[in-house]
């Protein structure tokens, strides 16, 4: 329960690790002084301010900002400290306001680390003051309390510090203001304001609402760049030091991603004409993320546009039905041409609405196709088609991409538009390449042919995953108990990209499963015990993919149990299955394996409409990625991956 | 320039310069009426819900409310449920965005309703309003204030319907009772 304090009121503090949040509407300086039981500040090293933001047990912002979050660990304060005074001041020399009277009343709140408010205080009644003591945290009989002070100083920071008994007050105040001015000068100018979007209409949320960190010096890229003294927040809190701000120049860019190109903006279109689409025209920190978001945006737009069309056509159909029924049941319509005329009118109404709906659909499709035409060539390898030229200039990547393309999606209404089907990496669930005859439509394909197609598709998926991960971050194991998949697996085997030769025979199956099960067990134990460093050195930490061809051939009951265990527990620790199987073949196991199939994402080696979108639930036709016939791109890419793996292993 | 609508009044949503509106936002805002007497500061939370029902020829086709935030065709979007109201004095607590260009061709009326999910009547609500904003430039087109809250739990605020090639907004302001929009269907139908 929050206590709203009035001036002079105090309130007990339930814990000693706290935050003090400040919001003022305009950039202000926040600081703190420590004092002993006599109320004396024992020197300038007992003052935390933007020039010296970290003291043992507390940390303040390095910047003037409209919002601050000061971190306190009252147990970690230096010996002899019995009182912490939180002070606010207006920065000088930055062209900002010179007195608090022109600002909205500053609001301070004491909160727990989880943001739960303990007490809050609005400092009202300020006028010509340019510095103010907001709160006091003090120790009374071994318990900490907070008191709302609200004492302003027209003489500014110097007067405030002098009142605290600091002899060097004027000098210290000057150095604080200088640190603030330097901090402001270092920060990068803000990007142009973004167009407000629907879901951002309520930004004026609670006072403690976090805003982007200021970007003076690249604030804290790595946790290793810790401040000189231990911050009370090193373990838990999100970003106490890179504190909050707004109002001043704010740098919204990610410190580690400075090089990212600015988002492309669409050229202004002549009024009336649709805007020319541009690749990467979506939100995101990097081009990759923007393209990913754009593809998802196109997916959603297509789903919804088609939903609108189908809904309109359904409505037109049902209305025509009703009208025709009415005509039939009306005896007058049986005389003369009246009934025919009414029937024709109903048909005309129907056709008119359907034509309107079709026109709206065509308009949207044209726009989306134009967008796809600029987006497809711009995609990075991980989410590009195999026929994209980007694969010819393939280089082994250094970073794990956001997502990988598993194929294309389309609806019957959008034959000419293919939306990439992207899934995030690392994978969240395994894959099932269905080699069943039920999946392969058309009787032209016999069982062997469909198996071969499915394994080819699996190889293409595995090759893509290997290619888009940095070497050593992804390893592929193969179980091919009968050895029947050897021709299809040749590209993987010959390029040396597999972690081990395909496991053949019952012994091979058992061995491969046991090794992966051991890995899952060890990693799981380490994670649960919170000791990921204690893993044995021979255990590689890469993601694993186990391709199982011809299941359940070569699997005994024990192996099936192990496989189910891998399917259940593997994904959480980076071990995934890729089953190339026909569910019918495993029918002997009965419902035992149902959870296994359900846990896998089913893909087919031929186009099949079994995937639903998350918005409307259309049945989308999935098409597996095709390597262009006669193209060597897959082999070339795998050769490069194999070389990279080889040199990485050395 | 904002038009203060009275009950039953209709305004055309054509722009002054002859262009047509492309996107509008129906904003709903409210505050809880202060409690008299002791413990006056105890917060009283009133959960009003804005809903939009899409009609094709007097048949409900789709509905946008707090459990279905986006119409299937994506043209009508709810910005999310607000359970307490009074976020900003005069600001929208709940909003429904309508992309008029993308509304499917067979949808000819969109009715906006407000329900009190927690069952408090409008007597306990003050400063409730519903307004229509041109989403492209933030200009308020029309505002309709719920004056004199009575002992009812729902209100049919307004409808936006096709006229010729454009859209028109009509303030309805009919009181009704119901927890969600489903309960209001009988009350809505006479206004179509």
Image (cartoon, coloured by chain):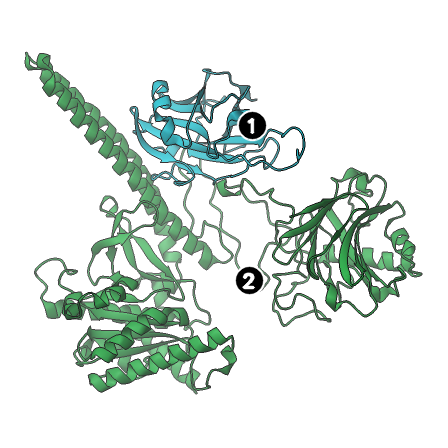
- Looking at the colours in the rendered structure, which chain would you say is drawn in cyan? B
- Disc 2: which chain? A
Instruction: Give x and y (percent) for residue A174.
Output: 86, 57
Displayed quadrant of residue A358 = top left
Instruction: Give x and y (percent) for residue B107.
Output: 32, 29
The quadrant in which the C terminus of chain A is found is bottom left
Mark 1, Cα crowd under 10 Å, few <14 / some 14-19 / many 20+, is some
Q: Which mark is residue A206?
A: none
- Residue B12 vs B89, above or below: the answer is above
Instruction: Give x and y (percent) for residue A218.
Output: 65, 63
Front residue of this view, candidates B123 and B142: B123
Tag 1 residue: B124
- Disc 1: which chain? B
- Residue B130 vs A209, above or below: the answer is above
Displayed quadrant of residue A274 = top left
Q: Is residue B117 left or right of residue A585?
A: right
Chain A: its colour in the image is: green
């Amino acid at each position: 329960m929050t206590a709203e304090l009035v001036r002079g009121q105090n309130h007990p503090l339930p814990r000693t690790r706290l935050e003090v949040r400040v919001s003022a509407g305009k950039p202000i300086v926040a600081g703190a002084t420590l004092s002993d039981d006599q109320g004396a500040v024992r020197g300038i090293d007992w003052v935390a301010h933007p020039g010296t933001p970290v003291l043992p047990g507390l940390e303040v912002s390095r910047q003037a900002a409209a919002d601050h979050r000061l971190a306190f660990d009252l147990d970690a304060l230096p010996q002899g400290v019995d009182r912490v005074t939180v002070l606010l001041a207006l920065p000088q020399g930055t062209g900002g306001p010179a007195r608090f009277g022109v600002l909205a009343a500053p609001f301070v709140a004491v909160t727990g680390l989880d943001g739960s408010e303990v007490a809050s205080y609005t400092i009202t009644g300020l006028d010509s003051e340019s510095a103010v003591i907001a709160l006091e945290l003090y120790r009374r009989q071994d318990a900490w309390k907070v008191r709302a002070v609200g004492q302003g100083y027209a003489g500014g920071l110097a007067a405030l510090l002098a009142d605290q008994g600091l002899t060097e007050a004027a000098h210290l105040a000057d150095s604080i203001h200088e640190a603030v001015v330097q901090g402001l000068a270092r920060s990068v100018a803000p990007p142009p304001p973004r167009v407000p979007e629907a879901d951002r209409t309520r930004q004026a949320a609670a006072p403690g609402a976090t805003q982007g960190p200021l970007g003076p010096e690249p604030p804290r890229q790595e946790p290793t760049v810790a401040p000189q003294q231990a911050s009370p927040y090193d373990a838990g809190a999100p970003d106490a030091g890179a504190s909050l701000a707004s109002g001043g120049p704010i740098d919204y860019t990610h410190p580690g991603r400075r090089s990212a190109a600015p988002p492309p903006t669409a050229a202004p279109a002549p009024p009336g004409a649709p805007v020319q689409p541009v690749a990467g025209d979506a939100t995101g920190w990097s081009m990759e993320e923007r393209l990913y978001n754009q593809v998802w945006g196109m997916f959603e737009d297509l789903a919804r546009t088609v939903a609108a069309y189908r809904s309109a056509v359904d409505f037109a159909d049902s209305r025509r039905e009703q009208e025709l029924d009415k005509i039939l049941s009306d005896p007058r319509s049986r005389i003369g041409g009246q009934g025919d005329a009414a029937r024709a009118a109903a048909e005309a109404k129907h056709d008119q609405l359907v034509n309107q709906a079709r026109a709206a659909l065509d308009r949207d499709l044209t726009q989306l196709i134009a967008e796809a035409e600029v987006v497809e060539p711009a995609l990075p390898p991980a989410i590009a088609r195999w026929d994209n030229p980007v694969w010819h200039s393939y280089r082994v990547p250094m970073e794990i991409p956001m997502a990988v393309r598993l194929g294309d999606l389309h609806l019957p209404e959008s034959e000419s538009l293919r939306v990439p089907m992207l899934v995030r990496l690392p994978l969240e669930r395994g894959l099932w390449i269905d080699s069943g005859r039920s999946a392969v439509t058309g009787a032209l394909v016999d069982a062997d042919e469909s198996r071969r197609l499915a394994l080819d598709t699996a190889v293409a998926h595995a090759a893509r995953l290997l290619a888009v991960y940095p070497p050593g971050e992804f390893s592929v194991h193969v179980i091919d108990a009968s050895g029947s998949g050897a021709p299809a697996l040749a590209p993987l085997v010959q390029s040396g990209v597999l972690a081990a030769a395909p496991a053949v025979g019952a012994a091979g199956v058992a061995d491969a499963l046991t090794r992966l099960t051991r890995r899952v067990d060890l990693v799981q134990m380490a994670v649960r015990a919170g000791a990921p460093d204690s893993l044995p050195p021979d255990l590689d930490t890469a993601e694993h993919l186990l391709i199982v061809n011809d299941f359940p051939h070569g699997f005994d009951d024990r192996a099936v149990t192990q496989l189910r265990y891998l399917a259940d527990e593997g994904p959480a620790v980076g071990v995934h299955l890729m089953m190339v199987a026909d569910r019918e073949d495993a029918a002997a196991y009965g419902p035992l394996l149902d959870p296994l199939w359900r846990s896998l994402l089913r893909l087919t080696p031929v186009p099949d409409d079994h995937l639903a979108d998350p918005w409307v639930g259309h049945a989308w036709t999935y098409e597996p990625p095709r390597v262009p016939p006669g193209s060597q791109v897959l082999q070339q890419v795998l050769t490069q991956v194999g070389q990279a793996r080889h040199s990485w292993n050395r | 320039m904002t038009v203060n609508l009275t009950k039953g009044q209709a305004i055309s949503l054509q722009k002054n310069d002859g262009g047509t509106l492309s996107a509008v936002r129906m904003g709903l805002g409210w505050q809880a009426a202060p409690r008299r007497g002791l413990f006056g500061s105890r917060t009283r939370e009133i959960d009003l819900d804005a809903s939009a029902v899409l009609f094709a020829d007097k048949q409900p086709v789709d509905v946008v409310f707090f459990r279905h935030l986006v119409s299937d065709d994506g043209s009508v979007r709810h910005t999310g449920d607000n359970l307490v109201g009074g976020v900003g004095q005069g600001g929208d607590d709940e909003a429904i965005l309508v992309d008029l260009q993308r509304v499917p061709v067979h949808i000819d009326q969109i009715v906006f309703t407000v329900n009190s999910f927690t069952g408090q009547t409008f007597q306990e609500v003050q400063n409730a309003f519903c307004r229509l904003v041109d989403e492209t430039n933030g200009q308020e087109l029309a505002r309709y204030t719920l004056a004199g809250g009575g002992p009812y739990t729902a209100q049919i605020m307004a409808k936006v319907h096709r006229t010729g090639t454009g859209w028109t907004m009509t303030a309805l302001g009919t009181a009704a009772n119901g927890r969600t929009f489903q309960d209001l269907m009988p009350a809505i139908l006479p206004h179509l």
